[in-house]
Amino acid sequence: MACARPAPHDGIDAASRLPFRRERLAYWPHANAGQQTLNIEEEPSSLQTRFATRIIRNWSPDLSARLLNIIGAATSAGAYSPGQEQAPAAFRRHGLAEALASRGRTIRDDGDVASFRWRPDPSQPQAMNLEAVRHACDLVASHVATAIAAQEDVLVLGGDCTVELGTVAGANAAGARIGLVYIDFDADLNTPDTSDGALDWTGVAHLLNIPGCEFSLARLGPIRPMLVPQQLL
């Protein structure tokens, strides 16, 4: 799942006022690949502490007046096999919207905006189902941008891990200030030339526009790269 919320405009941009230092981040882009490094710029103090502090400062406990827009990205186009496209239906079937409404949220479920069931793609073995991934991301981005522009919160139900590309692209298009907490089994810093063809191993790499990414995915939305490392936790 990916959730986007319009950021409060408090005039504070801590990251822009802090000195950065350049460091090298070690990562393994693929299980069979050797260690590689990525040059990044990091804040000298704890990013986790600053992120948590900012959430506390900006958090308002009264969300009852804010509409929460749920959209489904029922796609497994970027996965290794079919199945992940069924997740939005499973969330709905087990009462996600009702549970959120019971906590005082006003919910609107706009249904699935994208749908694709994984299939083999021997024509593009390094980036299987690329066109379907891009199409799903475009649809998600459009709905996220519309929701944020209307001052709505939006919850995107995936779907494979490429769902974050559309979510972030849409938030960028709406002019939102973005901080992404990315929780996954791995960092998804692969590029198509270092993966075995499943694009959901490559989502964060495309957000950061790491060399070797598919141009059509890395340029989603109005900003390239879609994120810089300081926005990612």
Image: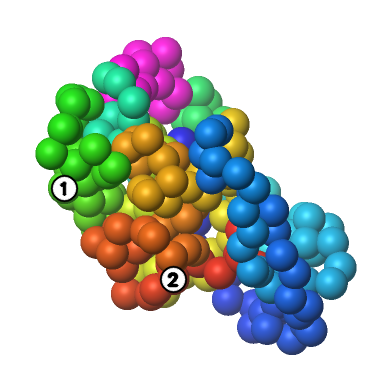
Residue furthest toward the top?
A: 94
Tell me where the magenta segment starts and ends, as one range. Answer: 83-98
Q: Give the crowd class for mark 1: few <14, some 14-19, many >=20 residues within 10 Å.
A: few
> Disc 1 on helix, strand or loop?
helix
- State the residue at coordinates (76%, 79%): 20
Which residue was labeled with disc 1?
131
Q: What label does residue 225 carry, if any?
A: 2
In the rendered image of this protein, does residue 170 appear above or below residue 223?
A: above
Q: Picture coordinates of residue 148 (x, y %)?
A: 38, 61
Residue furthest toward the left?
A: 123
Left or right of 58? Residue 180 is left
> For the residue marked with disc 2, what is the amino acid?
Pro
> Disc 2 on helix, strand or loop?
loop
Q: Earlier in the sequence, mark 1 or mark 2?
A: 1
Q: Picture coordinates of residue 204 (x, y %)?
A: 49, 52
Q: Give the crowd class for mark 2: few <14, some 14-19, many >=20 residues within 10 Å.
A: some
In the rendered image of this protein, does residue 103 appear above or below residue 52?
A: above
What is the magenta segment's predominant secondary structure?
helix
The question of residue 94 being in magenta is answered with yes
- State the residue at coordinates (65%, 69%): 40
> For the residue marked with disc 1, what is the amino acid?
Glu
In the rendered image of this protein, does residue 154 appear above or below residue 210?
A: above
The question of residue 165 being in magenta is answered with no
Instruction: Decide if residue 1 is in sight here.
Output: yes
The colour scheme used here is rainbow
Asked whether the beta carbons under mark 1 and mark 2 sit within 8 Å of each other, the answer is no
